[in-house]
Amino acid sequence: DIQMTQSPSTLSASVGDRVTITCRASQSISRWLAWYQQKPGKAPKLLIYKASTLESGVPSRFSGSGSGTEFTLTISSLQPDDFATYYCQQYTSYSRTFGQGTKVEIK
Amino acid sequence: EVQVVESGEGLVQPGGSLRLSCAASGFIFSNYAMHWVRQAPGRGLEYVSGMSSDGGSTYYADSVKDRFTISRDISKNTLYLQMGSLRVEDMAVYYCARSNGWYSGIDYWGQGTLVTVSS
């Protein structure tokens, strides 16, 4: 299976900060990558798919980029509601794997 | 309104079996790929199994291959996960979810159902 590695595992930031999370694939996945946000005790929420397409209703401060094996999720100005854990997921031909997650904490 | 609702929560001994169900509503079930994703206590998300929209293709994580079986009943708009030879490491919240085709993000998730494996 394709392995997905996120960095950092934990990120401490303040409201208003620009935040970037990186996700690397063990082999090329083209642009078949999604990003999710999860809060404690809740199901994940889709933020971005196909590497850079914003899901309907997701604030424009979230953006995604990348292709091949390296991808990034950027939050342009961190808001109080954004403190959560973020996961990347690849979805290639009949294979899906998640990264290990990045927890965004209040600094 | 789109909804996916899991059921089948339970406590099972190691080596035992359990079947989870996922009732879908608010969308045309046969037009969507369906998935099971799990999360062990305090851990990250793990993709478990998926079925294509036409039901012709299925996928299993190596950790559950040959022990779990995904299936669906179109007439009941229900997805199933039959779990066998359960291990302590299978203990997790299991989420049912859908995507608009295989090559798409998972856009709707259930609330999750807890599977406890313990003697």
Image (cartoon, coloured by chain):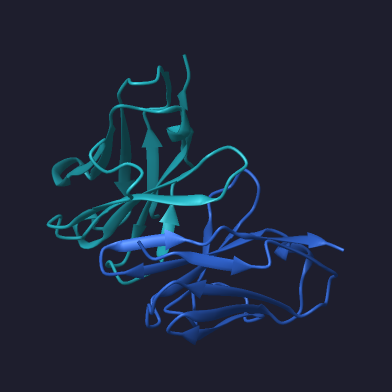
Determine whether B70 is above or below B83 in the image.
below
Where does residue B99 sit, x and y in percent of width and height?
34, 62
Chain A palette colour? blue
Specify the quadrant of the image occupied by residue A26: bottom left
Taking the image as shown, residue B37 lies to the left or right of residue B60, namely right
Where does residue B74 sit, x and y in percent of width and height?
16, 47
Chain B palette colour? cyan
Determine whether A20 is above or below B4 in the image.
below
Where does residue A18 sit, x and y in percent of width and height?
76, 80
Taking the image as shown, residue A105 lies to the left or right of residue B24, namely right
Taking the image as shown, residue A19 lies to the left or right of residue B85, namely right
At horizontal 46% and vertical 71% (from top left) the residue drawn is A34
- Count numbered badges in the picture: 0
Q: Nearer the viewer, residue A30 or A47?
A: A30
Q: Quadrant of the N terminus of chain B?
A: bottom left
Taking the image as shown, residue A53 lies to the left or right of residue A76, namely left
Is residue A56 among what the camera can see? no
Instruction: State the residue lying farthest toward the top.
Output: B119
Instruction: State the residue lying farthest toward the front.
Output: A26
Where does residue A79 sit, x and y in percent of width and height?
77, 70
Determine whether B75 is above or below A106 in the image.
above
Is residue B108 among what the camera can see? yes
Q: Nearer the viewer, residue B81 or B48?
A: B48
At horizontal 47% and vertical 40% (from top left) the residue drawn is B112
At horizontal 35% and vertical 27% (from top left) the residue drawn is B86
